[in-house]
Image: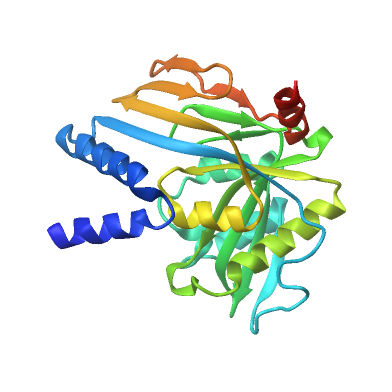
Amino acid sequence: MIDRVLERLRKRHQGIGYAKLVLYGLIWLIRKLSFGLVEFDYRYLLVQAVPERALLRGRTPGGFTMEVLAGERLIEADARDHDAAFSREPRDPARFLRRVQRGDVCFAAMRGGRAEGVLWLSFEDFDESDVKAVFRVHPAHGMAWDSNLYIMPDARGGFIFALLWDAANAWLREHGYRWVATQTSAFNGASLQAHQRMGSRRIGWMLYLLLGRWQVTFSSLTPRFDLRAPQDAARIYTIPLPDVIDRDAAA
């Protein structure tokens, strides 16, 4: 067991530094001692500009095809996918249908009829599945939300990450979008490094404290403090445009 813990800490240390590694260890200890009744979730809010050029410069990894899925095509793709990126656990059919109905777009890297990687884009509002928070972006001003990117474990380490983003960025440019916002765990060094290489900038943070079914949220966004009872609806947080952030910083 000690070896597993040390290996987990070694992987977490990549890209996050010692201070956050100690914080991650403390959170892990509290979770274990409370038997899961107390949870902390610390996330960064990121925004990246939609680039003018493709990451792969027109190169396509062999054997892959890209599919842009929405509406009925997305439902059909999910129905026939049983062992790939669409069907990873935990599955939530109701939430999946809600995402389809509100117009989310999914980019799928296919090989041999199998979805080896997916990237989702949402518009206007995105509801988190594990915390009571809804993130609102500004599609009218050129901002979308990167709601999920997942690559099958046996397909990681190659070109799929860049392939997915090239397809998404091409779609975003075609539809007049300038920015993509997202949130990721402050302890996920691999994700933070990948976003940094793509030019992402950190614009805020969210700290969720889950006490059973109660939730306390501290945030750099408004409201900075929020308490949610089990019966309460999710709190809405609006992601500021980078232009507004720069203007406020200058002022």
Name the residue at 59% across, 60% down: 118
Name the residue at 59% across, 65% down: 161
Whether residue 177 is visible: yes
**Relative depth, front residue between 131 and 177:** 177
Name the residue at 55% across, 16% down: 223
Picture coordinates of residue 22 (x, y %)? 28, 43
Q: How is the image coloured?
A: rainbow
Picture coordinates of residue 59 (x, y %)? 73, 78
Picture coordinates of residue 28 (x, y %)? 25, 41
Name the residue at 59% across, 44% down: 97
**Relative depth, front residue between 199 and 142:** 199
As drawn, is 33 to the left or to the right of 121?
left
Picture coordinates of residue 218 (x, y %)? 45, 22
The residue most toward the front is: 250
As drawn, is 52 to the left or to the right of 2?
right
Q: Quadrant of the C terminus?
A: top right
Above or below residue 17? Residue 128 is above
How many numbered marks have been drawn onto this rendered protein structure?
Answer: 0
Whether residue 129 is visible: no
The residue most toward the bottom is: 62
Q: Quadrant of the N terminus?
A: bottom left
**Relative depth, front residue between 9 and 84:** 9
